[in-house]
Each structure stands twice: as structure tokens, then as C-alpha cells.
Image (tube, grey):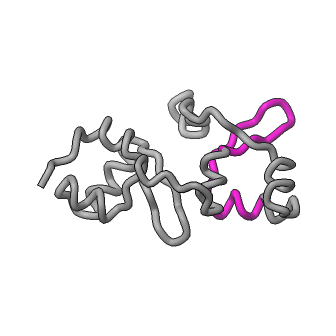
Amino acid sequence: MDDYFAHLSPDPTISEWMTVMDIQQKYCMTKTAVYSFVSHNAIPRKMEGNNVLYSKRHVQLAKGESVEDQVYYTIPEAMKLYGLSQDQIYKRIKKYAIEKVKIGEYIKISKRDLEKAIGKPKVI
């Protein structure tokens, strides 16, 4: 039973969280807009008592703030570095639960998680 619900637990590596009120104040959004935004961008969340907390880093990335290019690969970059097809990359993302972030129309995947699952990339 625990295995079935394991995907619902928040990523333990996420250390900074924001409340709905924090997001509203920082980005001048209504409560409805916040819920729509976090749902549309699949922002990780967790419950603490009656409060819903959202990953600060994922909110910032979705809003286009301080994108840390050194910690993420785009899908084409990962394909080139590892010599894999797009389907193979997506299968590994799903199989190993590799963190992914949608930034605009692009999906970026965690370098750390990908290297842990597959190994260091081939240098061409």
C-alpha cells in the first residue's frame, strides 16, 4: 500500500517551500491564479497541518527567475550527451523518477538525478 502512494510524498531534497500567501504577495497574484499556476506547471507540494506548501525553486523556475542552467539539461542536450533517443530519455525519467521542470515550452531534467540513474555522460 505504501508503494502505491509513494509518488505522492514530496521530494526530500526540496528544502525551501512557499505558502500560497507568499506566492500571492511576491508575484501579485490572486489565490485562484496561484492555484491555476501551480496546477498548470506541476509544482511539487506538501501539506503541513492546514497549510499547502509549494517548492520555492520550482515556482521561481516556472516564473523565469534565476534559471540555474548548470543543474539542468534540456532533453536535446541529454540526448546528445548520452547518445540516447528522446523516447529512451523519457523512459529513464519515468523509471528512475528523475526530477523535471517545465520552463515555458521546454522541459529540463536534473543533471544530478540523471547522472545518478545513468552515470556520467560520454564526452564526445
Residue 79 relative to residue 96: left or right: left
Q: Is residue 13 above or below residue 25?
A: above
Q: Nearer the viewer, residue 14 or 9?
A: 14
Location of residue 11 (image quadrant):
top right
The quadrant of the image that shows the C terminus is bottom left
Residue 49 percent coordinates (x, y): 83, 30
Location of residue 18 (image quadrant):
top right
The quadrant of the image that shows the N terminus is top right
What residue lies at 61% left-to-right and 50% top-to-bottom?
58
Which residue lies most toward the bottom here? 105
Q: Nearer the viewer, residue 70 or 114?
A: 70
Q: Is residue 41 visible?
A: no
Magenta stretch: residue 107 in it? Answer: no
Residue 84 relative to residue 28: left or right: left
What residue lies at 65% left-to-right and 64% top-to-bottom?
40
Q: Is residue 15 above or below residue 85?
A: above
Please give the range of residues in magenta. Answer: 35-55
Residue 96 percent coordinates (x, y): 37, 41
